[in-house]
Image (cartoon, grey):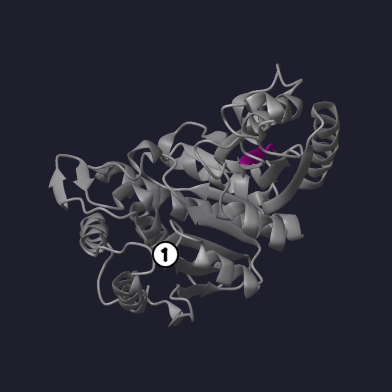
Amino acid sequence: MDTTFTVTPRFTVKMLEKALRLYTPSLSEKPMAEFLADKCDDLGFEDIHIDEVGNIIAKKGSGLPRILLCGHMDVVPGKVKVRKEGDSLYGRGASDAKAPLMAMLFAAASIQNNNGTVIFVGAVDEEGNATGIKNLVKNNMDVDYAIFGEPSGIKQVTIAYKGRLAINLKVSVPDSAHASAPWLSKNAIQESMIFAKELKEGLESGQEKRSKGMLLTATLTEIKGGTSHNVTPKDCETIFDIRIPVDMNCKSIEQRIASLVKDIAEKRDVEAFYSILDETEPFEAPHNSPLVRAFTLGIMDVEHSRPTLIRKTGTGDMNVIGNQWNIPVVTYGPGDPHQAHTIDEKVSIEEYLRGIEILKKTLEHLKRLHDIQMK
């Protein structure tokens, strides 16, 4: 490695501590981007630059495969005093997601020429509106595999995320009445409650044998209606957040929504219109892809046990990149996901160090497995 110093475990911990001392809430990541650019330079990366939205991008190694290692630099608001206590390192972002990001940096730094090319990215605004990821997707990067850095615990690899549909449903009744004579008209809020219950039941029915990771869920998250305290409402709007498992897709669920809304509206004798606010397809990395197999081997090398491949019930950046670029993508990183966003966020130093080793081994295995697949 063309570095002016040796990357020791002590050095990697010191650098994580420095990263935690930079308080970088969403869209204030510049100090972290400059810190990472500086480190990439020391570690022999090339093409180091900060793009138009503030992502830091750097390249290491050469040849195939081309692997994107992407973590995020921003943290949720709220400072946590940076300190070491025993095996724990405390600080905002310790788990989510500066430990995964720094682990990726040091794993990428180990790549030699002709052993594959790593594109390392520190993204902005992941906790906000995903400005950083959206910009990456727009500039198609021509990569074979992608790894996103989020705390998963070092023995778990996230291979799937659910998709998401958000819909706005507007229920209208012909008239309103004075609240002292409510029998004179239907009440749009009450009708919306009945409508929401029937829509939820219609979408979620017949799933008794499914695990949580494979459940379609329809959750009512917002409601607004009414114009005055003494008038029955004529209109009411509700918002649904619908999570779609990997064996379904947005289109088939939209068709179910359309027919359910039509049927319920006719049955209840109300007018109902819905519009789609967000549409993200579910994503799952193929279990037999070189990427998933490389992680399994990398974790077995360091931990001497097989990892758990998990399907998460949320929706993430992985969906967007995996579906748009049609490549295997997983999410991985040291840290406990339950520590994320907590008032005393911390990461195990031992786990962080082992996470770096696992990522290094995974990159080695991925080169070999990719070459075999290409033959």
Q: Position of residue 2 (x, y in %)?
A: 36, 77
**Quadrant assignment, res 37:** bottom left
Give coordinates of residue 9: x percent, y percent: 25, 55
Q: Amino acid at mark 1?
A: Ser
Residue at coordinates 59% horizontally, 35% vertically from top-left? 220
Q: Foreground: 257 or 364?
A: 257
- 177 sits to left or right of 51: right
Q: Residue 158, percent across and down?
A: 55, 42
Task: Based on the picture, tell me whether residue 37 belongs to the magenta stretch.
Answer: no
Who's the residue at 52% across and 70% down the image? 119
In which quadrant of the rendered image does the N terminus lie?
Answer: bottom left
Residue drawn at x 64%, y 57% is 320
Where does label 1 land, which residue?
110
Give the left or right position of residue 101, taking residue 189 as reference.
left
Q: How many marks?
A: 1
Task: Using the rendered view, name the quadrant where residue 337 is placed.
Answer: top left
Q: Secondary structure at mark 1?
A: loop
- Highlighted magenta segment, given as a residue range: 239-245
Quadrant where the image shows the C terminus: bottom right
Q: Is residue 184 visible?
A: yes
Q: Nearer the viewer, residue 229 or 5?
A: 229
Q: Main secondary structure of the magenta part?
A: strand
Q: Say which quarter of the image contains residue 179.
A: top right
Q: Position of residue 121 (x, y in %)?
A: 47, 68
Residue situated in front as seen by the camera: 122 or 4: 122
Circle 1 residues within 10 Å: few <14, some 14–19, many ≥20:
some
